[in-house]
Image (spheres, coloured by chain):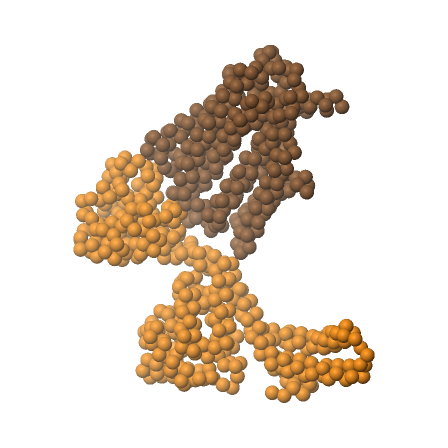
Chain colours: A brown, B orange
């Protein structure tokens, strides 16, 4: 039964929930809230079952490929959305959250579904690396959403405009609190993801398998993201005028823009991060480091994907298990 | 059935008349007891607010119940007034008009400030009081329950109650609540002790504000207002220090010049570290230099800003009025149809009983003539007879229901009585 659930099922549910949220702008309805919650919850249920099915059938899912990583990040975002709707039923939070959820599902569809090869010894660090980065990036997204809402709300209030009845937003104080927490949490999780990535790489380096050179653009990119987030978090915490208000909102929005910018650039930057043997063979440095012989052991386990991987792969670059190649 | 309302409201009676006819809770209770004694077969609910005094009455029979004159006399006598002094200010609504009027009142569409929420609670209290004093009955019960449902529907399906129209309510409900999530941990500073400050403070206190400081040139007046809301009074010299700590400021002094100029606020601003501050400058002339609104984290609103918002809200309410009236009309027709249909109940019951008795007689005769029938066959035949009776009853019942939508189906009921020999 689980195999019958497709990405379309939950993406369509989220799209309907978003459409219902959007109708707030035009008319009032007594049943819209319940319908919206119903569609979003049904979507989340289907999404959960889909991830469970992937985890039980695909090796190493739900964090082993770009596809699974994006779907899990979207799942976390929807869970947070439902939690927020429960506490702020009147606020049009879905208009801001659900497009990003759908964008993540869309990104997942464009991403590589093949699990990445990895040595079982590094599995724990790989898992931690993926999970920390997932939470860090979700925190950045939540901070961005809260930041945008804060700036909109503050702009209205500065212009002495009444909050429109059809597009209500949470209070500035609440949004400010979410912004502050999001910026700190994103810095902590991304830093933890970076450190666990370094340890993962060191373990792989010692065993001479699948390690990423320290000068790889992905390492620098993630390091840069972490540095930005840590500096932003410290700035917001230590510089008192940046404790509150628009400065924190700008910081969270800028963090998201930084992240989105590096994500967009990713396919254009050659990297050996989580590259597979055929890709690795294209670069002499990595080719030297990897053990290319043991194909079967590589495809039997999988690494944890992190967002520093290429968004899409051309079919010619995909690795197939040895048995399928033979067939 | 006779439904009637006699009373006065802000639409037709001046304040002096409304004041003379108004009832407090004790007076209303006494009046209802008196009503029961004078008109024991007539249900009554007495609604008395600042803007209206209305007696809603209902009887099952058209021929019973007090006349307009008798109700007017009753109202006058309750207050020891001459009937002539109030008679011309009392108006009457009856039947459908009375139901529509009650629904309109409960939904706050007939209020002085359309959409004000207090009236619903007042209607509810009036009905509860009538229930306690046993002057309410099944008809008034249905009417008032329906009125409460209509009010809720209007509130739910239109924005008529959402838009606030007084300056303090707009300031707190529409602006302060958008800035602050909660008020119990906010420091409220009240500068001056005018009437507007006091009213705003009441809204803030209701919203949960607890840390209230009042400063005023007259320390006694500051102490008096602070005392009412569990706050404290402070000296005028502490203004700068208090502004540094404040989250919300309400200013209503009569000073001819701004008491907080931009340079003065700049000095304070450094110590606030750009923490958000909501300033309600309700004074005319203004107490805060308007240029302060450009400072970071400052949300400064003057009386004019709030008055503009009030006007916009009033306009929004008016735009919602036709939709609300459509709901009232729809509910009035539905309620009357149900009420009329309910009145056909006894005739339907008698018709059903008559046919049921015929069915029983025929079945008995049939089973006596066919003693060899087993239990399943008997049950099958009984079911067939039941279906037959129900199918025969269906068209007259449908006709009664349809007719009820256009008023009490007296003609049809009379025809049924004569056709099927149904006796009262």
Along the line of sight, which residue is nearer the eye, B22 or B144?
Answer: B144
| Count of marks placed on residues | 0
The reply to whether residue B190 is visible in this rendering is no
Along the line of sight, which residue is nearer the eye, B86 or B381?
Answer: B381
Tell me the residue at 45%/26% (across/down).
A191
Along the line of sight, which residue is nearer the eye, B190 or B205?
Answer: B205
Work out whether B298 lies above or below B364.
Answer: above
User: Percent x, y for residue B371?
Assistant: 80, 81
On the rendered structure, is B176 left or right of A254?
left
Tell me the residue at 66%/15% (across/down).
A293
Tell me the residue at 57%/49% (across/down).
A38
Q: Quadrant of residue A59?
A: top right
The reply to whether residue A196 is visible in this rendering is yes
User: Percent x, y for residue B318?
Assistant: 46, 60
Q: Quadrant of residue A64?
A: top right
Work out whether A318 lies above or below B129.
Answer: above
Tell me the residue at 41%/43% (across/down).
A174
User: Percent x, y for residue B327?
Assistant: 53, 64
User: Percent x, y for residue B250?
Assistant: 29, 50
On the rendered structure, is A230 left or right of B225?
right
């Amino acid at each position: 039964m689980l195999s019958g659930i497709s990405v379309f099922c939950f993406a369509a549910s989220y799209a309907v929930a978003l459409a219902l949220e959007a109708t707030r702008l035009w008319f009032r309805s007594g049943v819209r809230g319940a319908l919206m919650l119903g569609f979003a919850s049904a979507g989340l249920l289907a999404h959960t079952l889909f991830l469970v099915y992937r985890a039980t059938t695909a090796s190493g899912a739900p964090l082993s490929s770009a596809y699974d990583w994006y779907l899990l990040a979207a799942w976390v975002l929807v869970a947070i959305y439902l939690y927020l709707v429960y506490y702020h039923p009147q606020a049009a939070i879905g208009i801001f959250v659900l497009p990003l959820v759908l964008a993540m599902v869309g990104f997942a569809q464009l991403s590589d579904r093949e699990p990445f090869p990895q040595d079982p010894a590094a599995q724990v660090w790989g898992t931690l690396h993926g999970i920390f980065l997932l939470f860090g990036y979700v925190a950045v997204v939540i901070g961005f959403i809260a930041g945008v809402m804060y700036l909109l709300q503050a702009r209205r209030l500065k212009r002495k405009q009444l909050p429109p009845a059809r597009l209500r937003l949470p209070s500035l104080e609440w949004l400010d609190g979410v912004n502050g927490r999001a910026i700190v949490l994103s810095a902590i999780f991304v830093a933890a993801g970076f450190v666990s990535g370094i340890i993962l790489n060191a373990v792989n380096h010692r065993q001479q398998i699948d390690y990423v050179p320290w000068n790889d653009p992905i390492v620098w990119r993630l390091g840069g993201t972490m540095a930005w987030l840590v500096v932003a978090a410290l700035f917001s915490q230590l510089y008192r005028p940046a404790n509150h208000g628009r400065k924190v909102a700008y910081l969270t929005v800028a963090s998201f823009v930084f992240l989105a910018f590096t994500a967009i650039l990713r396919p254009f930057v050659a990297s050996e991060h989580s590259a597979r043997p055929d890709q690795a063979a294209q670069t002499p440095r990595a080719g030297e480091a990897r053990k290319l012989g043991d194909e079967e052991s590589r495809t039997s386990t999988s690494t944890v994907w992190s967002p520093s991987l290429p968004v899409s792969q051309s079919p010619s670059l995909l690795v197939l298990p040895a048995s399928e190649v033979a067939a | 059935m006779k439904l009637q309302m006699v009373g006065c409201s802000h639409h037709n009676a001046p304040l002096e008349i409304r004041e003379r006819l108004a009832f407090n809770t004790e007076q209303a209770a006494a009046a209802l007891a008196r009503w029961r004694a004078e008109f024991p077969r007539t249900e009554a609910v007495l609604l008395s607010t600042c803007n209206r005094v209305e007696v809603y009455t209902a009887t099952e029979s058209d021929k019973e119940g007090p006349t307009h004159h008798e109700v007017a006399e009753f109202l006058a006598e309750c207050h020891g007034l001459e009937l002539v002094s109030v008679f011309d200010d009392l108006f009457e609504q009856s039947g459908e008009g009375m139901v529509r009027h009650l629904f309109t009142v409960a939904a706050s569409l007939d209020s002085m400030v359309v959409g004000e929420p207090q009236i619903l609670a007042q209607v509810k209290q009036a009905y509860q009081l009538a229930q306690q004093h046993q002057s309410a009955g099944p008809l008034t019960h249905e009417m008032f329950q329906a009125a409460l449902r209509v009010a809720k529907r209007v509130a739910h399906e239109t924005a008529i109650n959402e838009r606030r129209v007084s300056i303090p309510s707009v300031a707190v409900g529409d602006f302060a609540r958008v800035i602050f999530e909660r008020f119990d941990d906010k420091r409220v500073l009240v500068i001056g002790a005018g009437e507007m400050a006091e009213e705003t403070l009441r809204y803030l206190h209701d919203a949960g504000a607890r840390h209230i400081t009042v400063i005023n040139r007259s320390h006694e007046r500051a102490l008096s207002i602070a005392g009412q809301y569990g706050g404290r009074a402070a000296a005028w010299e502490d203004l700068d220090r208090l502004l540094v700590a404040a989250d919300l400021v309400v200013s209503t002094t009569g000073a001819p010049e701004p008491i907080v100029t931009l340079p003065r606020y700049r000095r304070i601003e450094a110590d606030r570290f750009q923490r958000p501050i909501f300033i309600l400058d309700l004074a005319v002339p203004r107490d805060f230099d308007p240029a302060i609104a450009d400072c970071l984290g400052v949300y400064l609103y003057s009386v004019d800003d709030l008055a503009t918002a009030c006007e916009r809200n009033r306009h929004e309410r008016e735009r919602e009025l036709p939709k609300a009236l459509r709901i009232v009309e729809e509910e009035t027709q539905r309620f009357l149809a149900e009420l009329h249909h309910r009145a056909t109940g006894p005739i339907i019951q008698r018709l059903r009983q008559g046919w049921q008795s015929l069915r029983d007689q025929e079945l008995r005769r049939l089973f006596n003539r066919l003693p060899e029938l087993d239990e399943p066959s008997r049950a099958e035949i009984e079911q067939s007879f039941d279906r037959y009776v129900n199918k025969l009853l269906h068209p007259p019942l449908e006709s009664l229901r349809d007719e009820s939508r256009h008023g009490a189906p007296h003609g049809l009921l009379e025809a049924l009585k004569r056709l099927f020999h149904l006796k009262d």
